[in-house]
Image (cartoon, grey):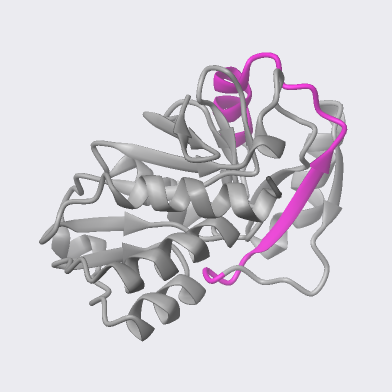
Amino acid sequence: MSNEDQKKASAEAALRLVEAGSTIGVGTGSTVTWFIRALGRSGLKLAGAVSSSEATTRMLKEIGVEVMDLNHTGDLGLYIDGADECDGHRRLIKGGGGALTREKIIAAASRRFICMIDSSKRVDVLGRFPLPVEVVPMARSYVARQLVARGGRPALREGFVTDNGNAILDVHGLTILDPVALETELNQIPGVVTVGLFARRGADVVICDGRTL
């Protein structure tokens, strides 16, 4: 089964966990696109959704889902998203699509986080996928030096600006043996908005190729 077929299967399995009439959080990325397509075909009616990106907002509106402000919804029961990497403890690297800050906020505000992946995203140790770090533009070089000092090779994501108006450094060459500690440490660097490690708040359920891990 191709990676795209696996993503589709995972998205369809995640949709079965969504209750009619609920308000959910929806992430960003290729697997989320499959989820939104499945939601549109299903006829399932939601009260609304909180979106992690402008791209997701457009897709949700196209299928008739009301996009709501998290400030008005309060905490959510369910957050649906994908990941760029997932280890055996359901800790993740996210942010390949550039929406890591909003994704992290919605995940934190949700009681349950369902992560949809294909088998290529499963790893024993996080770090093969370059770790995205969202930074305030004026701090880009300073943060990059701090990342180099910690053994990483940061590269500016050229021509990309986040929906929050910030830059992203993609950090290569990391072997992340303690994701919780590294997430905590990097988030303390002045100028870092957030880091794409979802370890302190990882996924509650991971669905791979349509099956729950």
On screen, 12 above or below 186? Answer: below
Q: Position of residue 118 (x, y in %)?
A: 62, 42
Residue 188 appears in the picture as rendered: no
In magenta segment, residue 186 = yes
Query: Which residue ends up furthest to the top in the rendered image?
Result: 177
Locate residue 108: give its quadrant.
top left
Q: At x 57% / y 51%, what residue is drawn?
A: 7
Of residue 6 and residue 164, the one placed in the foreground of this image is 6
Of residue 170 and residue 13, the one placed in the foreground of this image is 13
Residue 161 appears in the picture as rendered: yes
Count of number-bearing discs: 0
Image-based side of 187 in relation to 167, left or right: left
Q: At x 65% / y 55%, what residue is drawn?
A: 4
Of residue 22 and residue 191, the one placed in the foreground of this image is 22
The magenta-colored residue range is 163-188
Image-based side of 207 in relation to 61, left or right: right
Q: Position of residue 199 (x, y in %)?
A: 51, 27
